[in-house]
Amino acid sequence: MKKTLVALATLSAIGSAFADVDVSGGIKLYGVLDQAVTQQTLRNPSSATGITTTYTGMFASQATSRIGFKGNRDLGDGIKGRIQAEIQIEPDNSTQLPAANRGTFVGLSKEGSGEVLLGTQETTAYEVFGMDVNGRVEYKPQVWRTTTSNNIQDRANNSLKYISPEIGGFTVHLHKGFSDTASGPNTFFSYGVKFHKDNLRAAFVKDRLENAQASYKFAGVMNAGPSKEGTTVVTGQSSTAMVYAGAVTSEINRQIGSVSYDFGSFSANYLYAKSYVTDSNVGSLTTNTVGIKVPYEKITFATSFGKGTIDSYSTNSGSSASLAKDGSITDWTTGIYYNIDKATNVYFLYSSSSVSGQLQDGSNKTTAIGARYNF
């Protein structure tokens, strides 16, 4: 215990030394360091024998570790320039640097006119996901989070985003992502509305991803935690996911809404999400999640429960897609966060999710104990 406290104190001291470092031109260095001892026990829904496997390892469980630079510059006539460059870092991986390019863009804004951003950017849907009481925990246990069938729906590259000026608490968000290559035109588009006034926050977004396959990382299938390392993709999975609808040429649509209210002594959140395809191979995944967060001095408790239904078109026997028949998914996630200061917390996370209607019922139980530091 003493060693743990010493390590946390050292981390805090280092972070404080580098917090809010300003470089020439008003550029600020920022980042997140997150590490946890994480264990996942998976019951594979694509196995006729219902194989159960347990994985243990170090993982950034509460948030992706990252480092970046951002800044604003007054260009005159009420116009401001904005830049951001952010890359992912993995303290648990010593063999290579990750190649993930996160939010990296340039933009212009003017009061009363809004803001235009160009580059790789988080989608409005991804931002709405973060309204859950436990935020965007990185092993992504909440059932609403499973409506993402492609990383492009988290962060769109080659993209153009417009954010309107705030009017009565409302802002409009338009986002267009262009394809990376001519052979794989995963064109992305979304439009959404956000509202924030006093203790009430709400958001709704609808987005579309072309030429992608609707799929979901069902409970028991390889997730984003330690089980991602050194595991063979089994029959019935497509890119570690299981198909529930459509073909590669499908057009995936999503509708996502969230409402949060801070009552003072606690806050509550509701999230709705639906993912579906529009071609003849119709399938959908609909989820509802409710959560509550209670702050108490330096400790915060957060718990959420979700339930969803799978309406699967993929029912042909003999195909890998046949494993994803009509069924249901459930999830319960609890987090306990001890805030050492405004930048540092230690946490405990537990999630239990399940899926039915597959070849076998699947399940995923995840436990993580770790620390996170923002600078």
Image (cartoon, grey):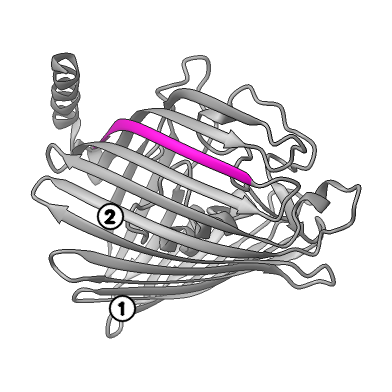
Point out the tag, 2 or 1, that comes first from the N-terminus.
Answer: 2
231 vs 270, left or right, is right
Please name which of the two marks, 2 or 1, marks the residue nearer to the observer: 1
| Residue 268 image-quadrant placement | bottom left
176 vs 62, left or right, is right
- State whether the magenta stretch is mostly helix, strand or loop: strand
Identify the residue under disc 1: 166
Residue 372 is inside the magenta segment:
yes
Residue at (27% x, 37% y) in the render: 347
| Residue 7 image-quadrant placement | top left
Q: Which mark is residue 73?
A: 2
Q: Secondary structure at mark 1?
A: loop
What's the CA distance linking mark 2 and mark 1?
21 Å
The range drawn in magenta is 362-374
Q: Which amino acid type corresponds to the residue marked 2 in the rendered image?
A: Arg
**Within-10-Å neighbours for mark 2: few <14, some 14–19, many 20+:** some
